[in-house]
Amino acid sequence: MLAISGKRFTKEVTLRGSVSEADRDRMTFELQPVYGDKVSGPIPEQHLDTVIEAFNGYRDGIRVLVQGVGRHDRQNRLLSLESIEHINPLDPLDVPAQLDDLRNLKDGWYDGYGKAPSHEGLDWLAHKFMLEYPDTLPRPYIYPTPEGGVQMEWSIGVYDVSLELDISKQTGDWHNLNMRTIEADTRTLRLADSSDWDWLNAEIGRLTESSE
């Protein structure tokens, strides 16, 4: 949905962030997105408890997913939230939120060297992960690599699993180490290809089942 009025317009938005302020009397709140400037919006009555709980957990890193309509300027900068449709608590390992964290990095972040991941590459990875990776599987921890890539890590029972992604080439180097036997296996995945995501999902599922 897109509505234009004067020099501003409204459109649907999805934001992940923390509730930094909440005003019960005015029924408004402020959201600090994981990446981007703080915005304010109305609190729908049915979501008041969720907003207050998120505000109380602000210092503990509690985050929410907000879906609604935002008002933007002509440069497409989000000015405020005009209306809210849904506010839901986020899993601490929500992958798009973790990837949004990496958008705050600048070149030189790692002892003056590290390259910041490209936003286009992070967009691709967030979209592809949401499209290909089932919600039923454990989510990974996500870290930047000094080369401008992304590393996903899973700790599944005795298995120490990592996937180092080159987001410019859309490939990933899989490494799985059995901490008990010290046996390891590796594989290069072409993550533009859904069949390689199928292999990844099956392997994470197999390791999870064997560790239960």
Image: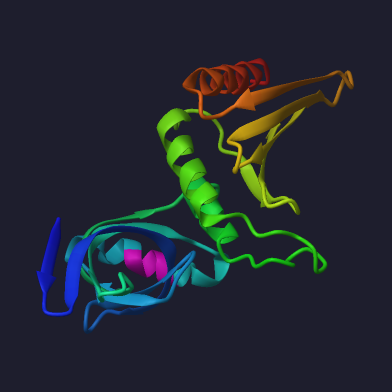
Magenta residues?
51-55
The answer to whether residue 20 is left or right of residue 185 is left
Q: Position of residue 77 (x, y in %)?
A: 33, 73
The front one of 194 and 17 is: 194
Q: Position of residue 179 (x, y in %)?
A: 85, 26
Using the image, determine if residue 95 lies above or below residue 69.
Answer: above
- Residue at the location (25% across, 75% down)? 74
Quadrant in which residue 9 is drawn = bottom left
- Residue at the location (70% across, 59% down)? 115
Which quadrant would the N terminus be assigned to in this image?
bottom left
Quadrant in which residue 23 is drawn = bottom left
Using the image, determine if residue 50 lies above or below residue 37.
Answer: above
Residue at the farthest bottom position: 25
Residue at the farthest front position: 169
Quadrant in which residue 175 is drawn = top right
The answer to whether residue 142 is left or right of residue 65 is right
Main SS type for the magenta part? helix
Q: Is residue 53 magenta?
A: yes
Can residue 29 be seen?
A: yes
Q: Position of residue 143 (x, y in %)?
A: 67, 50
- Residue at the location (59% across, 58% down)? 102
Using the image, determine if residue 125 lies above or below residue 133.
Answer: below
- Residue at the location (31% across, 77% down)? 40
Can residue 134 be seen?
A: no
Using the image, determine if residue 191 lies above or below residue 44.
Answer: above
Q: Is residue 200 magenta?
A: no
The front one of 109 and 92 is: 109
